[in-house]
Image (tube, grey):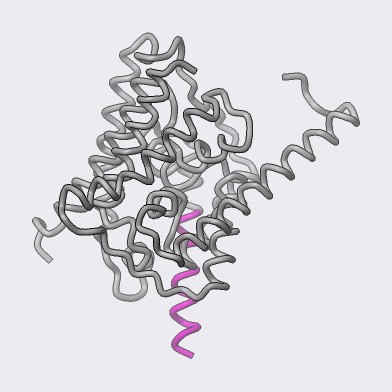
Amino acid sequence: MNSARVIATGLSGLVFGFGLALSGMLDPARVRGFLDVYGAWDPSLAFVLGGAVSVASIGVWLSRQLRRPIFDESFHLPHGRTIDGKLVGGAAIFGVGWGLAGLCPGPAVASITLGAPATLLFLVAMVAGMMVHDREAIRLVGSAGRQGRCRPT
Amino acid sequence: MTLASYLPFLSGGVAIGFAATLMMMLNGRVAGVSGILSGLWRRTDAGPAASAAFTTGLALGPALYALAFGRAPEVHLTSSAPVLVIAGLLVGYGARMGSGCTSGHGVVGLARLSPRSIVAVAVFLATAIATVALMRIGSAL
């Protein structure tokens, strides 16, 4: 990992966090207001998502004009097209948690510097949930490997 | 609300899209928060230094906002501790199981017109809306 790539990653994170703060996404009450379509619906986050996806689409188009990214030899993008139970189930579970508290991973991490104890509690639980998943995934791959069912990578 | 009052939301979105563009054009990677964060404890091709850099930048973003505008961003979080813990566990586990969250699937995946991301966004929006609706019914009883 060269230093230019690490700096670029940090810069992307900084702009991302600034955008989250500007957009109101750090406020769980506003996020839940956006999800409350059967109540007092607050459409403001549709502008956030619309703006973000529009600009990112230009970014995608621009990077497709490049033979390789500026700081790397090749693109590292997922190309899977399989829609399986893991994708749908994971998204469904994620959505329930998102609706419950109005927080998702970006805002949870970005809010560290705001120092609200409630957000920090959510962040700790979220990281624990991620680690539980990743540990299970390692164990499953490991046992599949021992039984000879693991595809060579 | 007038259209102009939505300007901060739109410009916040533009900044998020620009962050995703930087990651894509400079490093050729998806700016997905859950995937990058998990690089702190599992092996990824970008490496732990990149995960640490992104996470640090992300956490400093709101501080930069506070510096620029002279006030901290508004946060209203009234959920009880048990709800926060359950919600956190579900968000973390679900994001890793579904290979992405609001950023990776929601922003970059939709911009790339990835069929997996389009399905993921439809599913998590549906369950999130249903959860909020059920909680509204629950609190009205």
**One can see residue A87 in this view:** yes
Q: Which residues are magenta?
A: B124-141
- Residue located at (28% from left, 54% from top): A46
The one nearer the camera, B22 or A122, is A122
Using the image, determine if residue A4 lies above or below residue B70. Answer: above
Say how many tags the image has: 0
* Picture coordinates of residue B119, whole percent (x, y): 50, 45
Which residue corresponds to the image point at 65% horizontal and 47% vertical from the top-left? A131
| B126 magenta-colored | yes
**Looking at the image, residue B127 lies above or below residue B68:** below
**Picture quadrant where residue B85 is located:** bottom right
Residue B35 x/y as whole percent: 52, 38
Q: Residue at x 55, y 60 (%)?
A: B88
Across and down, in percent, residue B44 comes to 58, 28
Residue in the picture at 43% in, 13% down: A72
Quadrant where the N terminus of chain B lies?
Answer: bottom left
Q: Nearer the viewer, residue B64 or A22?
A: B64
Residue A153 image point, x, y percent: 72, 19
Quadrant in which residue B113 is drawn: top left
